[in-house]
Amino acid sequence: MSKNLIQKLTSFILVALILSCSEGSDNKPLTEKLPSVEDLEKHSEEFTPKIYSYDNGIHMAVGYGIANSIMVEGETGNIIIDASDSTFEAELVYKQFKEINSSPIKAIIYTHNHGDHTFGAAYYYNLFEDKPEVISHESTDYYVERIMGILNPIISKRSTRMFGTELPDEEVINVGIGPYLGVSQSPVGYIKPTITFEKELKLSISGIDIELYHAPGETNDQLFVWLPQKRALMPGDNLYKTFPNLYTIRGTTHRDVKGWVQSLDHMRSFNPEYLFPSHTKPLSGAEVMETLTLYRDAIQYVHDQTIRLMNKGFYPDQIIEMIELPETIAKSPFVNEFYGTVRWSVKSIFNGYLGWFNGNISDLDPLSRAEEAERFSRLVGGEAVLFSELEKAVEGRDMQWALQLSDRLIALNYKNEETRKLRAEAARSIGEESSNPNKRNYLLSAANEMDPRYKEGLLLPQTEGLLREISIDMFFDILAVRLNPEKMEPGEFRVCFSFTSGIKKSITLRNSVAEISSLNVDCDIEVESEDQVFKEMLAGIRNPIFTVTSGKINTNGNAASFLSFLSKFSD
């Protein structure tokens, strides 16, 4: 047989194999197997407040807030890994740690940027005259500022819903990875890192050898801590006792799922004997490697199967009906959907690889929400019929359909008060029956927000101390994304700023955008200010009118024009 013929036959067999694999039962919907609300209630046992102490000098506080805090004893001082979600909680935890070992804190390590790991740091930092080092990945501070800066309003609102911070205590069973989110209990105490690294950092503090490795997963800045002398691993939020949040409904940058698997493999390479997650209880012995392996396999399975079905042309809404974890993985309590879900993960993985367009041509440029609702209404016989169907859906406890019907009625602005009341009832019903805390709390919170008596709270109150830790650059980024084009006037207008720190900035208004620059030329208004005063004014701690007219911010005789300029950055 000739070589060319062999190659042709091989190619034919390969194509046939691929085509045969694309046929079969992949498109059959799966029967969803979810834990119950009773299972979620039992899961709360994971967060019973307790200090877990080991002979190797490692102590972990579980259940005092949403995230764990870890203390490692050294020769002349101790190390804190993750500093709780508020100074209030940090103080509560440190009272327990101090009874074990009262030596000073020499270093604070942030495993990543989330507030429940960083916002208690100021308590430790201000407690000691000899300030502890604050150590993180080099990008952590950027992500902290991003959350507290340009995305603060929407991230705060969606986090409030997801964690149920405005719900009555009796409605919050737990938040999946902790008992509750306590970030609003006291002023935020974030401290900028003093030591950062890119890929890895090895150092010795108080006689303890510490190895830090960049480990993208739940966040891009995630790191893990390896203590070789103690055979102890701190994985941050890359592992906890629930299916991981490969996507979080509060909103986030895309999470690199394949990178998450690789990070877990890096951890496995050390063969640790002790595992101290930043959420849920610690592990030791053979269970450590077993859990790390199972967890990475669960993530890889969802990733790989999503890609496989994407490549066969299925849409995200189809794929979520086609993937469930293998029984060997699904039986583990570490993948119960008490935080992330396979369904949400599939959608995020699809979007991460192919973007927002799902491939369905009808979704490329669909009708507006209002136009689609109007046509749907005409199709069923009018708005009154549509509203009647909503009432029937609620009465028949067909609550997801009720939510989707209410979308159309709200778009039509039909019987808004009655529609929203029925929508709230549907949301509350689904929420109460959900065993996923993120979904449960989000829906219950949304239902409360539809009550006309609802008053919005504040998740992240701004303080002078917090503002000192945020760069002046971030405040200019915030101004740029808050420019209201409806208040703009034709032409070009430039305001130049000189700060006592020596920083110079300018904002040029043109074509309904705010161009931020470090050049001060051809200024219509020249402004001089202390950095902190300017930050406090923009954050609402200081009244803008009083701050400007009192001379705390010098506008060189242009107070009225400057205040008019500031008004363009509000709704």
Image (spheres, helix red, strand yellow):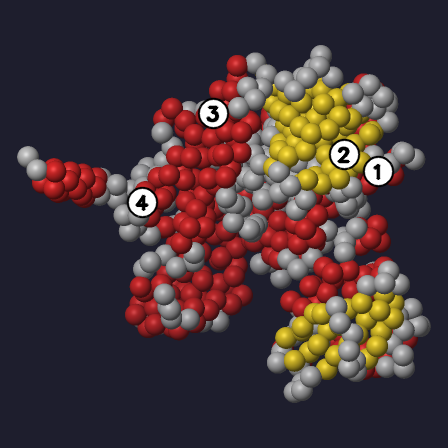
Q: Can residue 97 be seen here?
A: yes
Task: Classify 430 as above or below 200.
Answer: below
Residue position marked by numbered label 1 in the rendering: 125
Which quarter of the figure has residue 122?
top right
Residue position marked by numbered label 3 in the rendering: 293
Residue position marked by numbered label 4 in the rendering: 309
> How crowded is the residue under tag 4: few (<14 C-alpha within 10 Å), some, or many (20+)?
many
Q: Which residue, as the protein is rendered here, is positioned at the far top?
A: 55
Q: Amino acid at mark 2?
A: Ile
Residue position marked by numbered label 2 in the rendering: 108
Q: Quadrant of the C terminus?
A: bottom right
Q: Nearer the viewer, residue 558 or 390?
A: 558
Q: Secondary structure at mark 4?
A: helix
Contact, CB < 8 Å: mark 2 with mark 4? no
Contact, CB < 8 Å: mark 1 with mark 3? no
> How crowded is the residue under tag 3: few (<14 C-alpha within 10 Å), some, or many (20+)?
some
